[in-house]
Image (cartoon, rainbow, N blue to C red):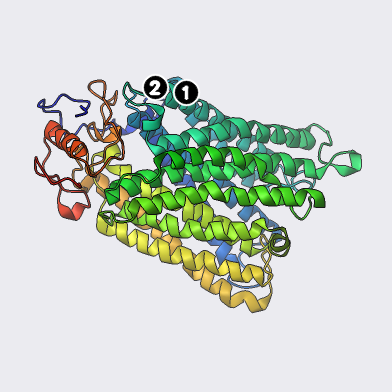
Amino acid sequence: MATISVPIGQRAEPQRKLPGFAEYLRWSVDHKIIGVQYGVTALLFFLIGGALALLIRWELLTPSIDLMADGKAYNQLFSIHGTVMIFLWIIPMFGAVANYVVPLQLGAKDMAFPWLNAFAFWLIPPAGILLLMGYFIGQTEAGWTSYPPLSTLFSDDGQTLWAMSIHLLGLSSILGSINLIVTILNMRPEGMSIWQMPLLCWAVLATSLIAVMATPFLAGALTLLLLDRVGGTAFFDPSRGGDVLLWQNIFWFYSHPAVYIMVLPGMGVLSEVLSVHSRKPIFGYRMIALSSLAIALIGFTVWAHHMFTSLQPELRIPFMITTMIIAVPTGIKIFGWLGTIWGGKIRFTSAMLFSLGFLSMFVIGGISGVMLAAVPFDYQAHDTYFVVSHFHFVLFGGSVFAIYSGIYHWYPKVTGRLLDERLGKLHFALTYVSFFFTFFPMHWVGLLGMPRRVAVYAPELQGWNIVIGIASFVLGISTFVILYNLVWSFYNGKVAGANPWRALTLEWATTSPPPAWNFDEDPVPFEDPYGYGTEAATQYLDAIDRTFGLPEPSPKSGALPRLNPSPAVGD
């Protein structure tokens, strides 16, 4: 039988105190504090980006300009909304999950380079402030993609701040990713081969490889853009020998792999949550692990599908083929997850519900993505609300649903308390229904010809936009449910114990919250992190229970009850 981090029979302190509030406001090299700093910062920017989204939908309730002063103000609105949601919400929030959970899953005492880890985080707040300061000097209005000549000749000085901000965020991403790669490859404990790593670690590894290889290209494009704006160069000015398509090629060579920077960690979260909450081993562990690397590799071959309408005809077919091929490793994951939950003892916790929500919404986004991969269809739907619907199903229905699932799953480990399950289920119901009615009708209005990034549209489309607007306001309200739950449960939530979900990965083999160095002794991992349903797994979980000696959680808390010393195989 595998052992755990604290010797059996030695009563461990059941719940350690969190660091003081001031610790989270200053420099720290503790990966757990840094993970919380990432998460809270990302949530703050999520509120800002969400508020901008609601202003967009408010403006689109009528087919004419009402709320905004003019079209320029509307352009600024959606430009900052997209930038904040991608670079300051989804990517940093998955950075929070990786920073907090991965070292614990590896049994490590910290990240490989703790100082570098802190430095990577502290680049984010000034970058966010720099981006928002553009409103004081004339905000960018070229969209989050910032195509020239909109970003060079027709945008105010806020565009320069935009480029500087993304530069800092890109540097943060590179440094954090290097740290994660070294940590995952070099800090596994004795007894954990690379084929015994939790699948979240595999997903983070693939994501980090993408970030290290792709982000320097974005940095190069931003440097050229800054030189054109302030240095008098003409890299993107055709009248002086430049080429506007140069920006598109470099930008999308980063930004399409960046889609997987925002999705792959969420897929890792799903692999953890679905297995634990259905009490089933992962179906096809190696294929799911390798498919993450396959997505990372193939992701570098599809960037030009964003340019079908401007690409040379002979290049369209190869990029159409690679775009369709990348659906294969994604499909492997989906079938692996379905095989995992098939016949399982599913417990519909809030974490499980959001993971199942990810599955359904991401499949819809994937189907519309395959449709857009076909050149003839893309010609008709390019720059319409069909595209807006597609990437929101991927990035909200996928990434954000996975973030919510991860929050409900690991909040007990971070705080030592469980989130309220009744509020969690209310949050899921509101989010799932309102999200669907916000973004699914956009497929239809896009096919009817409504262009994206335009405040004035055909009057006959107003009815659908009212439906979308009302649903979006409900979606905004749903966010306050989880915010209230996070705060209320921090003070009043039920004590979680070391392992409320009875999981086999190493982060659950220490106290909640963990001690400063994570484990009191060097941990020895269980032979199979997803090996539920075996006598060895049952004995291992019982050993954790006996070690930490905690009272059984209330069934209303959503935690799995502790079993008797010799339960039937199948837990």
Q: Amino acid at mark 1?
A: Val
Which residue is pictured at 38% across the width and 45% down the height?
Answer: 271
- Quarter in which the N terminus is drawn: top left
Which label's residue is closer to the chain start, 1 or 2? 1
Residue bearing the label numbered 2:
187
Give x and y (percent) for residue 249: 73, 42
Above/below status of 170 relative to 408: above
Asked which secondary structure carries label 2, the reply is: loop
Residue 267 found in image quarter:
top left
| Residue 188 image-quadrant placement | top left
Residue at 66% x, 73% y: name it.
448
Foreground of the two, 336 or 118:
336
Q: Label 2 sits on what residue type? A: Met
Q: Quickly name the residue at label 1.
A: 182
| Res 99 → quadrant | top left
Left or right for 557, reference 394: left
**Residue 288 visible at all:** yes
Q: Indicate the position of residue 49 as horizontal and vertical percent values.
A: 52, 51
